[in-house]
Image (cartoon, grey):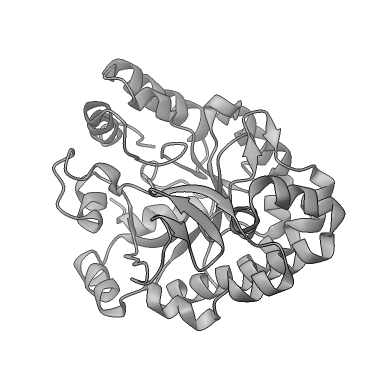
Amino acid sequence: MMKPRERVMAALAHEVPDRVPRFEVWIDALLDELGQTDAPSAYVNLGQDCVMMPMQRPPESNAWKTGVDEWGRVWKDGMYADGVIDTEEDLLDYSRPVSYAEEYFDDGLVGEVQARYPDHCHIYGTHEIGPLTASYMAMGFEQFFMRMVDDPGFVHRLLANRTEWSMALCRKAASLGAEVIVVGDDAAYQDGPMISPEMWREFVLPYHSRIVESVDVPVLWHSDGNTEQLLPFAIEAGFAGVHGLEPAAGMKLDRIKEQFGTDLVLVGNVDVRLLFESDLAAVRAGVDRCLEQGASGGGYMLATCNSIFAGLDPMAVAELFRYQATVGMY
C-alpha cells in the first residue's frame, strides 16, 4: 500500500500507483456541514492524498471585503466588482514588494500541519496568483482586454508585475515545503479561451513559463472553462498538469487524455453540477465516468472540476468523498 505522497508523485511521473490519487485542491467551504473542525484535517479525514498548506491574508488587506484592495481590485460585500488600474502611477500605487509574500504564511503553523501529516503531499494553490487573472481583475475586465490591443506595452508591464508577485508566493510556499503548486489563472469561457492562441503566446505563455521555472516542484495550472486550445501552451510552459477540466464547458476527459495525457497529468473533471442536488447515484456515476476515462495508464488524479464551495449539497459532497474511497484501485 502506497503512502499518500507516494501515490501523488507516481501520478505526476505518469506511473501507475496502487489507486488513483484523490486530489481535491480547495476543500474548506463546507467544513461544518461535513463535520470537520479545520481545513488540514478535513483533507485527511475526507480521504484526500494532499493537504493544502495554510495561508493567511494580511489583516490590512481589503481583498474580499468592500472597497479597493492593495492590488487595485474593487470589492463589494466580498464579491469582485471592478478594477482601477489605468496608468503607470496606478500600477505603482497598487503593487506590493515581493517581500509582502512573507505575510501570507505563518511558518510555525505550516510546520505544525506538516508534522501532523508527514505522509501526505503538501500543496499550495490559490485562484489569485495567475498573472492573467490578477491583471484583468486589477484593470477591470473590459478595459484590460481593450488595452491588449490599444496599449500592449502597458499590459505587458502589468502582467510582468503580477508575475513577479506570483513567483514570490510560489517560491515562499516551496521554501516552506510545498511539494506541488497549483496556479489558478482562469482563462476561458464555456466555449473557448478568452483570447486567441496567438495572443496567448504573446501575452500569457512567457509569464507562465517564468512561474514554472521559478520553483523546483511540479506546478499545475487551474482554469475553469474550455481550455482545450490552450493545453499545448501548458505543455510548452512546463506545467506538470492541468486542474479543472470542466465538463460543462465541453472538456471531455477521454479526448483530453488521448491527446494530452502523455505530457500533462490531468486532475479533476468530476462535474460540480452533480453536487448541487442530493442525487447520490448520479454522484457515484460521475466518479465512475472519470475513473473510466482518465485512470488508464496513470497520470490522472480524481477531483472536482472546480472546488468544494458554498451552495453545494452537503449530502452529495459527503457521498463524493465516501464513494471515492471505495473505487479507483488499479
Residue at image location 54% in from the left, 66% down from the top: 71
- Where on the picture, by quarter, is residue 50? bottom left
Q: Position of residue 27 (x, y in %)?
A: 32, 47
Q: Which of the image's four quarters has the C terminus?
A: top left
Q: Position of residue 300 (x, y in %)?
A: 49, 42
Residue 211 versus residue 41 in the image, above or below: below
In the displayed structure, 221 sits above or below 161; it is: above
In which image quadrant can residue 158 be found? bottom right
- Residue at image coords 34%, 24%: 276
Q: x, y (%) of residue 84?
A: 61, 59
Residue shown at 63% from the left, 51% from the top? 140
Residue 160: x %, y % from top left: 70, 69
Horizontal relation, residue 260 to residue 95: left or right = right
Q: Name above or below for residue 158 compared with residue 202.
A: below
Q: Is residue 214 found left or right of 275 in the rendered image?
A: right
Asked whether residue 127 appears in the rendered view, the answer is no
Name the residue at 30% across, 34% down: 324
Front residue of 273 and 82: 82
Up the image or down, 167 lies above or below 150; here it is: below
User: Camera-side residue: 283 or 129?
Assistant: 129
Query: Can the viewer see residue 52?
Result: yes
Q: How many marks?
A: 0
